[in-house]
Image (tube, rainbow, N blue to C red):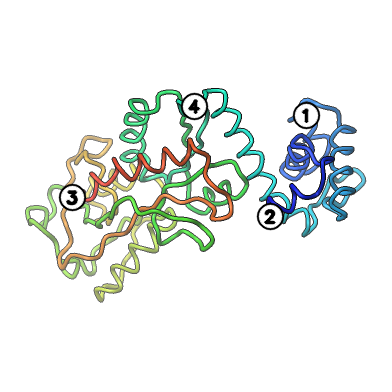
Amino acid sequence: MELEAMLEAGPQLTLRQLELFVAATEHGSFTAAAQHAYVTPNAVSLAVGELERVLGVTLLVRHRARGVTTTPAGIQLVEGARALLRQAADLQLTVGDHGTNLSGPVALGCYSTLAATVVPELWERLAERHPEIELSITEGTTEDLVGQLHEGRLDCVIAYEVALPLGLAVRRLYGAPPSVVLPESHRLAGRAAVDLAELDGEPLVLFDLPPSGQNTLQLLRSRGIRPRVAHRTTNFELVHSLVGRGMGFAVQYQHSGVEVSREGRRLAFRPITPEPESEPVMVAWPERLPLTSRAAAVVRLAQDCLPVEETAG
């Protein structure tokens, strides 16, 4: 439901009612929502009931001893309610600071392998420019992070463009070119760049955290190579350890900056020739949920400072 429609519902509709309704949808029962909001289950029930009366729709189906189920109307309301609550919180913080400083929390999601190079730079710059903003970071797969984004748990996410669904506002940060990871003793490790065709038939250590695994396989197949996957893992450091022991080569889109495995074995990161297209790294948020002034500042800062990684191999 659009914010304007909710505001036109009349003076009976309150932010507290929306807050308790959202809590009920997120926690699946009035009891769990009450524990989260430090009120009684009856208070949650009354708030939701009043919302339903004002809006003239059923928002939650009550199940005896089995919690609640959100109706289609309730699902429609949740997104707008979260947006309104976030805007109200943002307004309170802005007015409290007399509009001169940005302060308060910003929840940023970051695809796991990007975090090590993206987060430190962004966090340091943010501390210099907006020291009152409290940045929290959640790492995970793009699918998990986008889910939390739509649930209102995150303000924005940083991820590869290829895995982002429709319905998000996006801004490009930089391009991540893929590179080959080889053990230092590999016959091609001394090359300035590596043609993937020369690795045809060799075992592949596949970093398989979506979308990286699929990206790697598509790249190899586009070069006429049938990958022989020796091991799949979602552990970035394990990929390096296995490659360091000579158990295969790997392809990665984010240069770690340290050419050594956790075991101390040296690795060779080499550009791919012919050079493939870089994978765009984006910052994204729901189109229907406007950014708070704090989150917008983080997005602008990310656009300013993160393109320095553009040339990473």
Q: Which mark is residue 260?
A: none
Density class for disc 1 (Cα within 10 Å; few <14, some 14-19, many ≥20) is: few
Label 3 and label 1: CA atoms lie apart by 51 Å
What residue does disc 2 label? 2
**Frontmost residue, 243 versus 128:** 128
Label 2 and label 4: CA atoms lie apart by 27 Å
**Frontmost residue, 26 versus 11:** 11
Left or right, residue 8 beside residue 115: right
| Residue in the picture at 22% in, 52% down | 181
Q: Residue reaching furthest right?
A: 64
Q: Quadrant of residue 217?
A: bottom left
What residue does disc 3 label? 269
What residue does disc 4 label? 103
What residue does disc 1 label? 35
Contact, mark 1 vs mark 4 (Cβ under 8 Å): no
Q: Earlier in the sequence, mark 2 or mark 1?
A: 2
Task: Say if 4 sits above or below 227 in the image.
Answer: above
Which amino acid type is shown beneath numbered disc 1? Answer: Gln
Which amino acid type is shown beneath numbered disc 3? Answer: Phe
Contact, mark 4 vs mark 3 (Cβ under 8 Å): no
Q: Earlier in the sequence, mark 4 or mark 3?
A: 4
Label 4 and label 3: CA atoms lie apart by 41 Å
Density class for disc 4 (Cα within 10 Å; few <14, some 14-19, many ≥20) is: some
Which of the two discs, 1 and 4, sits closer to the camera?
4
Q: At numbered mark 2, what does the secondary structure look like: helix, strand or loop?
A: loop
| Residue in the picture at 11% in, 53% down | 189
